[in-house]
């Protein structure tokens, strides 16, 4: 009822068949567990589960901040994170389907809200961290989407819960790329570094 863009029947049917369940929340929970193993990730890649999950995230992106919305998004991010943990087919599919922009849209929305869901942001950043480990093309997509304003807004959330995966994303993107590291060391980039240091040294 709170969705502006309802989730398609095809997407739901694909999830239900892969999980042997007829409830979306339960399906996502089952698939999160299945995607924890190499064989599970490979099997779910062959069943095109990742595109279906991205469709769910896209449908929820512009929905009002509703508890059920955030719960389904959190489950979706956890599943995407697991699907992209070292599985090249899923990492490539995520990139081809503009998954970086889809996930970053949710992260920006949370960072700008008066009451951000830090768990949701954490899992979204974990998705991007796993995707960026796939190589330069994937790192470039993440970097171009978040640098530098996105990094600043996420760093300003000021919690270690979100700071750790944010640092992982930044480190993975900059590792072996001196030009990007130099940009972080510039006057504009210091805003990101200052917020991270402030969070890391707190309490």
Image: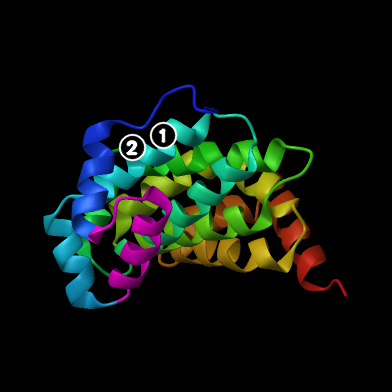
Quickly name the residue at label 2. Answer: 55
- Residue at disc 1, secondary structure: helix
Name above or below for residue 42 compared with residue 131.
Answer: below
Point out the stretch of residues depicted in magenta: 19-36
Image spot of residue 164 (x, y percent): 62, 69
Question: What crowding class fits label 1: few (fewer than 14 Cα within 10 Å), some (14-19), or many (20 or more)?
Answer: many
- Residue at disc 2, secondary structure: helix
Question: What crowding class fits label 2: few (fewer than 14 Cα within 10 Å), some (14-19), or many (20 or more)?
Answer: many
Is 33 one of the magenta-colored residues?
yes
Residue at the (38%, 39%) spot, across then down: 56
Q: Quadrant of residue 67?
A: top right
Q: Residue furthest right?
A: 203
By secondary structure, the bulk of the magenta-drawn segment is best described as helix
Quickly name the residue at label 1. Answer: 58
Image spot of residue 72 (x, y percent): 49, 48
Residue at the (65%, 61%) spot, across then down: 162
In contact (CB < 8 Å): disc 2 and disc 1: yes
């Amino acid at each position: 009822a709170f969705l502006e863009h309802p989730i398609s029947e095809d997407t739901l049917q694909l999830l239900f068949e892969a999980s042997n369940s007829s409830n979306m929340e339960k399906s996502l929970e089952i698939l999160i567990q299945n995607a924890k193993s190499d064989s599970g990730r490979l099997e779910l890649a062959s069943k095109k589960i990742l595109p279906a999950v991205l469709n769910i995230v896209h449908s929820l992106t512009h929905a009002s901040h509703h508890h059920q919305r955030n719960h389904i998004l959190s489950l979706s991010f956890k599943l995407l994170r697991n699907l992209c943990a070292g599985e090249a087919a899923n990492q490539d599919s995520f990139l081809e389907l503009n998954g970086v922009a889809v996930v970053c849209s949710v992260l920006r929305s949370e960072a700008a809200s008066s009451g951000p869901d830090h768990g949701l942001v954490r899992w979204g950043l974990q998705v991007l961290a796993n995707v960026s480990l796939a190589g330069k093309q994937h790192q470039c997509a993440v970097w171009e989407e978040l640098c530098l304003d996105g990094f600043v807004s996420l760093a300003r959330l000021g919690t270690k819960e979100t700071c750790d995966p944010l640092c992982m994303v930044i480190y993975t993107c900059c590792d072996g790329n001196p030009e990007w590291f130099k940009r972080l060391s510039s006057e504009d980039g210091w805003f990101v570094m200052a917020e991270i240091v402030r969070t890391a040294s707190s309490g």
